[in-house]
Image: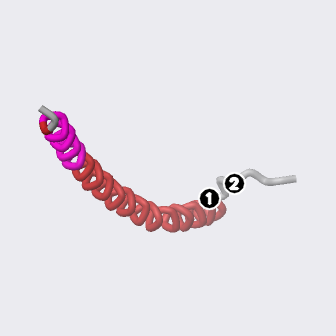
Amino acid sequence: MVEAPDNLISEYLRRLDGKMDRVIDDLNDLKIRVTHLEEGLAGVNPRLDRIEVRLDRVERRLDLTEVLH
């Protein structure tokens, strides 16, 4: 009867180990996805900055900007 608790504990530890492996795999997948999102945003931000400069230039050419005093 002494082996039963040891076997039960071993079984729970194996199950816990399997679950932890799945959590680690999911976390690694999420890290990869977040990295891809960050890289995508890094490419978008400079483009938005250039759009702002171009829009300012268009507004000046069309005299749509307010005169600052």
Label pair 1/2, CB-CB below 8 angstroms: yes
Relative to 51, residue 7 above or below: above
Quadrant of the rendering where the N terminus is positioned = top left
Residue of label 1: 59
- Disc 2 crowd rating (10 Å Cα; few below 14, some 14-19, many 20+) is few
**Residue under the point 44% across and 60% down:** 41
Residues rendered magenta in the picture: 4-18
Q: Which mark is residue 65?
A: 2
Q: Position of residue 29 (x, y in %)?
A: 28, 56
As drawn, 43 above or below 33: below
Q: Label 2 sits on what residue type? A: Thr
| Residue type marked 1 | Glu
Q: Quadrant of residue 39?
A: bottom left
Depth order, front residue of 17/61: 17
Give x and y (percent) for residue 40.
39, 63
> Under tag 2, what secondary structure?
loop
Query: Which residue is at the far top?
Result: 1
At x 43%, y 61%, the residue is 38
Q: Residue at x 31, y 58 (%)?
A: 28
* In the image, farthest residue toward the front: 1
Residue 50, image x and y in percent? 54, 67
Q: Is residue 61 left or right of residue 38?
A: right
The chosen color scheme is secondary structure
Label 1 or label 2, whichever comes before in sequence order: 1
